[in-house]
Image (spheres, helix red, strand yellow):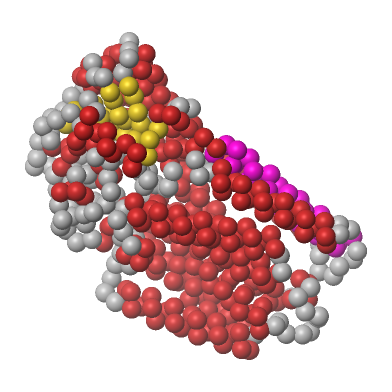
Amino acid sequence: MISPNLVTLLYLIASVCFIQALKGLSHPTTSRRGNLFGMVGMAIAVLTTAALIAGLASHGMAGIDLGWIVLGLLIGGSVGTVMAKRVEMTKMPELIAFMHSMIGLAAVAIAIAVIAEPHAFNIVANGLPLPTGNRFELVIGTFVGAITFSGSVIAFGKLSGTYKFRLFQGASVVFPGQHMLNLVLAIVMLAFGAWFIATQMWLPYAVMLLIAFALGVLIIIPIGGADMPVVISMLNSYSGWAAAGIGFSLNNPMLIIAGSLVGSSGAVLSYIMCKAMNRSFFSVILGGFGAAPGAAQNGGQAQRSVKSGSPEDSAFLMSNAESVTIVPGYGLAVARAQHALKELAQKLTDQGVIVKYAIHPVAGRMPGHMNVLLAEAEVPYDQVFEMDDINGEFAQTDVVLVLGANDVVNPAAKNDPNSPIAGMPILEAYKARTVIVNKRSMATGYAGLDNELFYMDKTMMVFGDAKKVIEGMVKAIE
């Protein structure tokens, strides 16, 4: 049987790997190393836990069936491997939401198992009640896990955009008295949690669990699509705290450390995302862009005319420019056009054009979506610039190529104090000498707002699938 000291040491090594993983993922140039640290750390944690359980089973520990544990590991590992191999970049946010939901559900399942048979987890002797401290930890882990699960399911539906059920649609779902209902439910949930802590009865625990599932749905449905990057990082934080709460109950330092890392990093990321959108965290939770009054809906701009051109026109403008800045958006991800874009940038660079990529923190459907997309195409890191680093250069840029981005380049954030996105930091593409915008149509972005950039005299719209349009540009340059 593996010794407790060795288990503690291996868990400590895994924790150090997780810390290094977070450090590595903070920058594109070290992200591969960060991922490697994360994989090594998780492998150590899983194998150590498996060895510990196997040792307990070999010593005849009651309630442990090694066969079921191995089966669970095989099923979970196989599903994770298959999904990771098959997932497309455009579906990565949905995959993350799905994983968050599984973490939340796992926390709830573990909490129920601990309450049902605490002696099997070596918390108390058979027949004795759980200590009050353990009940408190289980209550926190349960309701945070339940909220994470149901909220992530709704986020998955909103991100997917393929379900007709209203709760799964990108637009916010609001109704009178919604916030008061959420407040009342939260108070009632905590009251039943306190009842469980005092009595360890199943009834208050079950009611608390059901209310938590309902709250997860009610918290996410009013959030519009434009705020989904914040939701993703917020749910990431929730899943971490749920794991940490259960870790305290199980006296498992690995769960406590890993959960705390995920919870704290997710909270910091949520703050960064809100700052990048000029939003407060509570304003996102209480509504979101989709609920903002005055937001234009699709079709509201049909009466206005734009100047349109062809891929060949765009290629001529870019090949005769000294500098070109590319602003990638979700349309680029949908079309899976990152490799064609890399080829276009290379063609322009070969002709002596200075090419840069400008990344907005909330472009796409999750934090870092565009960075990952460009990294997949092996775009040189020294060509990729964050918003704060490149905004000062747009006024001296000859051509800006916007690919499927809407809200992150909308001048209304700067020029219209009455706009729902007023004050939101944007990529100041409108300052460039010439702007080329590729979109499938004139449909609005997640915020549901018309974009004045599209109607400027300096702007040329190129309609069509991003991949086909970019391939047309490459062919025209050749």
Residue at x-position 34% and y-position 51% = 276
Relative side of 69 to 334, left or right: right
Classified by dominant secondary structure, the portion drawn in magenta counts as helix
Location of residue 66 in the rendering, given as x and y in whole percent from the top left corner:
81, 58
> Farthest residue in the top direction?
478
From the image, which quarter does the N terminus lie in? bottom right
Location of residue 236 in the rendering, given as x and y in whole percent from the top left corner:
50, 57
Q: In which quarter of the image is residue 441?
A: top left
From the image, which quarter does the C terminus lie in? top left
Identify whether 348 is placed above or below 227: above
Number of numbered discs present? 0
Identify whether 88 is placed above or below 291: above
Let me know if residue 42 is in the magenta part.
Answer: yes
Identify whether 111 is placed above or below 128: above
Magenta region, residue range: 31-58
Identify whether 308 is placed above or below 422: above
Residue at x-position 40% and y-position 28% = 383
Let me know if residue 199 is in the magenta part.
Answer: no
Location of residue 43 in the rendering, given as x and y in whole percent from the top left corner:
71, 47
Q: Can residue 336 be seen in this view?
A: no
Q: In which quarter of the image is residue 35?
A: top right
Location of residue 265 in the rendering, given as x and y in whole percent from the top left corner:
51, 56
